[in-house]
Image (tube, helix red, strand yellow):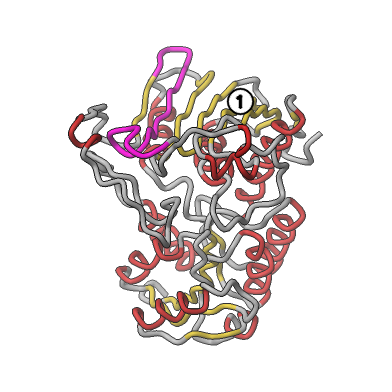
Amino acid sequence: MADRSYGVLLVSFSKHSHQSSFVPAFLEHPRIRIVGIADDADIDPYLKPLNRSWAEQLGVPVYEGIEAAVQRDDVDVVSVGHEIERRAEIARTAAGAGKHLWIDKFIGANMPECRAVVDAVESSGVTSIIPSYIYNDLVNQSKRMIDSGFLGELTAMHVDILFGKGIPRPISNAQRKPGFLPPGRWKFPDIKREILTVGAYAVALVQQCFDPIVEVYGQGGAYFFPEHAAHGADDFGTLSLVDRSGRVATVSAGRNGIASHGAGGPNQAFLFGTKGTGRIDGKRPGIDTHLRNRIVDGDYSVDDEDPMQWHSGPPTLLTSTGIEFTRAALEDLVHALDTGARPRFTVRDALDHMEVLLAVYESIVQEQPVRLSVEGGEAA
């Protein structure tokens, strides 16, 4: 029914997730109601008081035990905001209970986990959406330009997505861990792996514009931050992606430091076609202005509880004028629940997306390109 409301269960407020960013959209939507917060007993110590704090703010109960909570009759949608290592199990449990899924960014930590989620979702017939990637201005404007025919046939593209967060500092050899950490370890108390975290947005954009990706080449290990160098884990990377038609996309992605860009970090795509070229700026209006007094006299203090600014935005002179992507994604989900339509980015899309990201990491470790099957199978 078009006037039905949907109850959302928030599963965890992990600092590695965007659950807190989803809450305003859930609260504002007239047909969404938050019915509770759930988590398991064996979680990081900081999470229990954080979950309780959010429950008090929202006036909803906290349930200990995710498996039991998702079975509740008042739960229609499960918003998965746990660490990446826990998401696959939670998603499969919720799908098995017949609950629809709103999942933050990644559906699993590796390909077997991601496949298991896809199988669970598709066999249960529930609706799934990963809201983070394709509802933003950069994707929407790029798609409109390509679909308009203005460029002719798209032949190549370049994407820059960089977050102006954190304070870069000199890195001594003693601070630098030798080698590059392979894929598979994602959770750290002090850092995020930024090719995974930030590069994911650029890879999703390329996948929206290209045929299936068949070859990837990545480079990482050039550090801005000693925190990342100490782990041998990426804060910045460059990628090359080749699709089935032979088109090439290049990407630079990561975090490059506070005050490095007037709009908090470049968010742009360069599109190359047989008839012309185009540049899309996701930080409209596209004004590159760096005011010395705002940079020199800026307040660069960081919250002791958020030293790498995971949940605080960079200082900016400009903000996007586009529709906030979470709200656009939520409209897509509600429409899908009402009509049975397929959301624009589901767990099936997230499976292909993670395959490319994991292949990028394998390429960095192996120091050579990695081939994927034409239809998106195993890395070769």
359 inside magenta stretch:
no
| Place of residue 215 in the rendered image (x, y in percent of width and height, measured from the top left) | 70, 28
- SS for dot 1: strand
- Chain part drawn in magenta: 257-277
Check the picture and name the quadrant holding the N terminus: bottom left
- Which residue sits at x=65%, y=22%? 245
Q: Examine the rendered structure and indicate whether residue 157 appears above or below residue 353.
A: above
Q: In the rendered view, does 262 fall on the left or right side of 229?
A: left
Q: Quadrant of residue 257?
A: top left
- Which residue sits at x=18%, y=33%? 293
In the image, what residue type sits under mark 1? Ser
| Place of residue 202 in the rendered image (x, y in percent of width and height, measured from the top left) | 51, 36
| Place of residue 144 in the rendered image (x, y in percent of width and height, measured from the top left) | 39, 33
How many numbered marks are there?
1
- Which residue sits at x=52%, y=78%? 48
Question: Which SS does the magenta portion mostly show?
Answer: loop
Q: Examine the rendered structure and indicate whether residue 152 appears above or below residue 133.
A: above
Q: Which residue is tagged 1?
A: 240
271 inside magenta stretch:
yes
Q: Quadrant of residue 331?
A: bottom left
- Which residue sits at x=43%, y=54%? 307
Q: Examine the rendered structure and indicate whether residue 47 appears above or below residue 183.
A: below
Tell which of 355 and 334 is nearer to you. Answer: 355
| Place of residue 150 in the rendered image (x, y in percent of width and height, measured from the top left) | 38, 20
Q: Examine the rendered structure and indicate whether residue 129 appears above or below residue 260.
A: below
Tell which of 73 and 369 is nearer to you. Answer: 369
Within-10-Å neighbours for mark 1: few <14, some 14–19, many 20+: some
Check the picture and name the quadrant holding the C terminus: top right
